[in-house]
Image (spheres, rainbow, N blue to C red):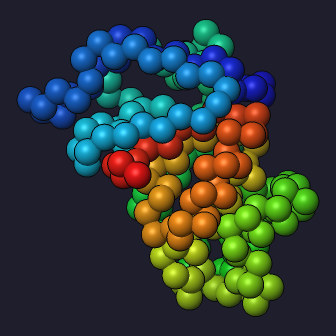
């Protein structure tokens, strides 16, 4: 049941927080490719990601993947094979190094892909030194979370505020790389740059 990242539809999505209306009859469609959702803080980007990742089930409307409702997928398989999400405030295991963290989240990863990504995101040193996650800078921590997401089997990647704490070279490398992979990648950003 591996999703190839070609057909995600959001149909008549409605979401409120109390009296505050977040979405009203929203229709969206995503195929393979790289998408950037831009908006001010509080505009609903993270809320949409929580719905797509099945963290938030209190909405009306439908989210379909290849015409199958997301709630009809087994949750564990959905998060392993279909959709992976990096929230902006997620944390990893502080007492473990980068590779140990990767092995917890990704059981079988491609070593060549890991090597290419670590070079692209300037993480070779922290991996060679086996630096503990707690000793990484904010930008390095964000890179490790992105690295884990990119190594996952999931064909839909949701990345919330990817550019927070990242150096410009890593951002440029990622923006150049992401459209080349066979996945649906949706990145949320409040940055206008």
Where, by quadrant of the figure, is residue 134 drawn? bottom right
Q: How many marks?
A: 0
The N terminus is located in which quarter? top right
In depth, the one of 184 and 95 nearer the eye is 184
Question: Is residue 171 visible to the viewer in this orientation of the structure?
Answer: yes
| Residue 141, image x, y percentages | 55, 72
Q: Nearer the viewer, residue 42 or 166?
A: 166
> Which one is nearer the viewer's eye here, 153 or 71?
153
From what the image shows, is residue 123 above or below residue 182? below
Residue 125 lies, with reference to residue 119, above or below; the image says: below
Location of residue 49 (image quadrant): top left
Is residue 186 placed above or below 21 in the rendered structure? below
**Vertical relation: 81 (above or below) 171:** above
Q: Quadrant of residue 121?
A: bottom right
Q: Is residue 149 visible?
A: no
Image coords of residue 11 (percent x, y): 42, 11
Residue 89 percent location from the top left of the image: 41, 61
Identified at 80% across, 85% down, the residue is: 128
Left or right of residue 160, residue 8 in this image: right
Q: Residue at x 56, y 22 (%)?
A: 30
Q: Tell me the residue at 60%/67% (across/down).
A: 169
Residue depicted at 62% across the width and 22% down the height? 31
Q: Is residue 82 left or right of residue 11?
A: right
In the image, is 10 to the left or to the right of 125?
A: left
């Amino acid at each position: 049941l591996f999703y190839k990242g070609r057909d995600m539809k959001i149909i008549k999505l409605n979401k409120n927080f109390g009296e505050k209306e977040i979405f009203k009859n929203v229709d969206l469609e995503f195929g393979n490719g790289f998408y950037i959702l831009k908006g001010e803080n509080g505009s609903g980007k993270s809320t949409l990601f929580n719905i797509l990742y099945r963290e938030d089930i209190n909405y009306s409307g439908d989210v379909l993947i290849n015409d199958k409702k997301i709630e009809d997928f087994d949750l564990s398989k959905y998060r392993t094979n279909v959709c992976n999400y990096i929230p902006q405030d997620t944390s990893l295991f502080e007492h473990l190094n980068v590779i140990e963290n990767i092995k917890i989240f990704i059981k079988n990863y491609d070593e060549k892909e890991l090597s290419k990504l670590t070079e692209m995101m300037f993480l070779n040193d922290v991996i060679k030194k086996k630096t503990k996650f707690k000793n990484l800078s904010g930008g390095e921590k964000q890179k490790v979370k992105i690295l884990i997401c990119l190594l996952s089997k999931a064909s839909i990647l949701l990345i919330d505020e990817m550019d927070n704490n990242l150096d410009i070279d890593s951002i440029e490398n990622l923006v150049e790389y992401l459209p080349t992979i066979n996945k649906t990648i949706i990145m949320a950003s409040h940055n206008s740059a």
